[in-house]
Amino acid sequence: MGDISRHRDIYLNTREAIPIQLLGRCRIARADLTYLEMGNYLTDVSQFRDPVTYIFAKQRVWREKILPRTGDKGTLLRVLSALAAYATAVPLLGAGRTKNAALAATLGVLPSLVSNDRLAGILGLDDWVDRMLGKPIELTPGKRRRRSNAEYGYIGQFFQHFIAGITHLLFAAEVPHKVSGDWGRIERIPERSVTSVLEAFFTQYYPHEHTDQPPFVWDASQRDKAPKWYAPSRRQRDTSGRSGGVMNAVDQHYVQYLAEGLSKIELEWRKTLQSDTEARRRLLVRTGKILHGVEDWYFHSNVVELLRLRGHAPTRAEAEDEETFARRFTREGLRGEAVFAAASRAERARLQRRLYRRLRFPAYERGNRKNTAGSASKQTSTLSLDHAYPAFPSQQDTAHTLLHALENLERKGHGGRGDRTELPPWAFCVLERLVAIRTDVRRLVEQKARARGISAVDVMSALAAPEGPAAQRVKPVIVDVLREWLPLVLTLLHESERQRLVADVDPLQWTDPVGPPPPAPAEPSDPSELDRQVDRHAKALEPKAYPDGVSESNYERAVRLMSDCGFLNPAGQASLRRAFEIDRKSQKESRFAPGAGGFLMQFAIDLQKVLDEGDAATERLNGREAALFDPASDNGSFSEIIGAHSLMSKDTLASSPFFDDAKVLASVASSSVLQMLLEAVSAAEGDSGLDWQKILWQLIRYPLPSGGWERAALALFRKNGKIPRLRELPELTALPRSARLPKAELARWRKGTKADELEEEYIKLELQVSKYRYP
């Protein structure tokens, strides 16, 4: 997922790029383009609901949380073996068999080996894991692509409502104190419209919607046997027979999905009544989802590296082999880059190393039950200069996707200002009002201020004036109070707090590190700082009586006060309250395990540890000259595994080199597709229509050796400092005239089912990996 704000930036560029007269001809207002951004945004945040990721979270729960606390390992392992056999057998038993009947058939032998009480307890844990992380796909009736919200488990439901609250905060017109910065530049829409769009378009993760390399062959070591998905397309093979192409998954399947989607939108737009503004807004949401896939091709693949390589001067000499050329390009290709010129020696080494590794294709270990995706191995990767391919979102990239996404939700909460320790502005107002209505909160503020050697009067003054000079000095006290009152919010949305919990350091002893954080202690405290945090959260979920006669948990009252302070609208308040109601309900499911919020806190800390270890490994590699051209698929830093999302993605400011290249090309492609679509639907229908496949193949292609709209766009950006418009790129301007199909040939695109087929592929994968949910 990376930095969700990148798609917002592209939207802001698109909004300025589309001629206002064209919008008028299409009967949409400039403000209606917010629906376009909502479709794009919801595609990204729907990744918080990924059933395949949830399956492996289930396995981690068994392996790391349940097994270590079970005295009789042999008994539990026998039961787990039987449960694993049950997971494999259920699809064969037929849809008519109930879970209990199928389970009884599979576990029939166990009662003679295990007491009924112990068996019931273990099976109770199995049900608890499923309630937390979702109903197994083989037990889900009906159309599996349209599962109910409850079937995604407490975690999925919590995220659904949590995301809904954040979405209202960002998009709803009824929020009085709107976020500042670039998010504040988005025109707001009525909260009823935000709710309606959320209900229709918050779905789940599917690889094709993000142009990710599909994990349909889950054992990655076997992907070379599935050229339909993973081989480079032969579409651009030149007259000499030299191959060079985009991975088939994208070139043949994803482009078809995008082309069918655009063709259907074009047809439906033409059929929409002139008075039906809401229908056009829904079509804009659908267009935003399509544009997300177009944009992600540039952010998640190595196409911009290959574009630079193909145009590098001096070009590859006849006697120069590919490896020598790749190494020369790695040393020379960044010299003109501002980010490289400004970097330290160590940072330059990192940039060059990342560039070289993006030119290679990974080798994988054979998959196993613990990691059926196949771990990137220490084996030598393959130099891959003729293959433009998207990143594979492997299990190692969970930290890059989910945790970075949470950090970006944090930045949205305070308008994108500040650093990794910044507090959202609502925290000051909410705490000020809590102090006014609860004496225990006032005492808590006084206690925390005294422990920090800070005057409680100064803290109270800062709460009333968050932009004042005292605010920065008293921030540690406010963090201390939030830790006691709203521990889940602080843990999920504050990186420094997560690093403290990883380091297992008392809050008063914690110094926010510059550079890599300190390692976790060899001997953790008992209870650990994380255990204390989870316990605080459980207590914060319990309702407390307030002077107004309402009993609410800390979180529910904080959400109410956010609304009173003007930082949230009524529908957003209701969504966040629902999230914490689900959390409290899940907390009561087991006295042995935390609920959704506690689970997410533990998960976030695990991910933070992985991120920090990756950063530390990167620092070590920066000091080793030999690491620059290390061909191993896994060089020891999870953020540099060849082919993985965290190496390939160029959607954060820290993901250079060629961040600007990806942003410019994604922006041009996205705004051009939208403008071509609007120009088509605003003109009279003739005897032909747009050939969207041909248009997309011009945008999503293996780089030409010279020329092309891509180089023209980048040259204009470097000259003017602005992303060029469609009218400035003749190759793209001519496309709508040359890419035409007779009306009779458009039917297959407008009736195509590629989106359904690709969703079914992911569901087939889920069925396959569901049997691995037990360790």
Image (tube, rainbow, N blue to C red):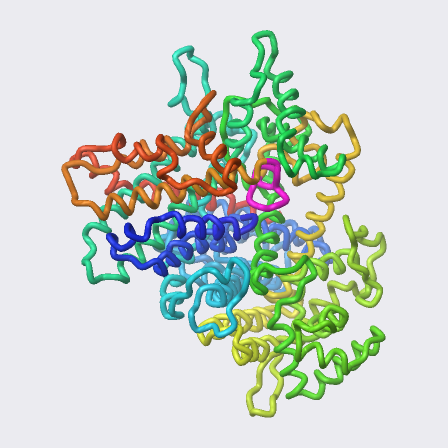
Q: Is residue 185 visible?
A: yes
Q: Residue furthest front?
A: 720
Q: Residue at x 47, y 46 (%)?
A: 766
**At which x and y percent is residue 438?**
67, 87
Q: Residue furthest top?
A: 319
**At which x and y percent is residue 6?**
52, 49
**At which x and y percent is residue 115?**
64, 61
Left/right of residue 219 with respect to residue 354 in the rendered view = left
Q: Is residue 115 magenta?
A: no
Q: Quadrant of residue 445?
A: bottom right
Our reading of the magenta stretch's main secondary structure is loop
Left/right of residue 738 with respect to residue 422 in the rendered view = left
Q: Residue at x 23, y 50 (%)?
A: 268
Q: Is residue 111 visible?
A: no
Q: Quadrant of residue 709?
A: top left
Q: Is residue 649 magenta?
A: yes
Given residues 536 and 189, the one toward you in this image is: 189
**At which x and y percent is residue 333?**
62, 26
Q: How many marks?
A: 0
Given residues 129 and 206, the one toward you in this image is: 206
Left/right of residue 441 with respect to residue 204 in the rendered view = right
Q: Residue at x 65, y 78 (%)?
A: 431
Q: Residue at x 24, y 42 (%)?
A: 750
Given residues 397 and 433, the one toward you in this image is: 433
Please provide the residue range marked out in magenta. 645-657
Q: Is residue 509 above or below residue 761?
A: below
Q: Is residue 458 above or below residue 227?
A: below
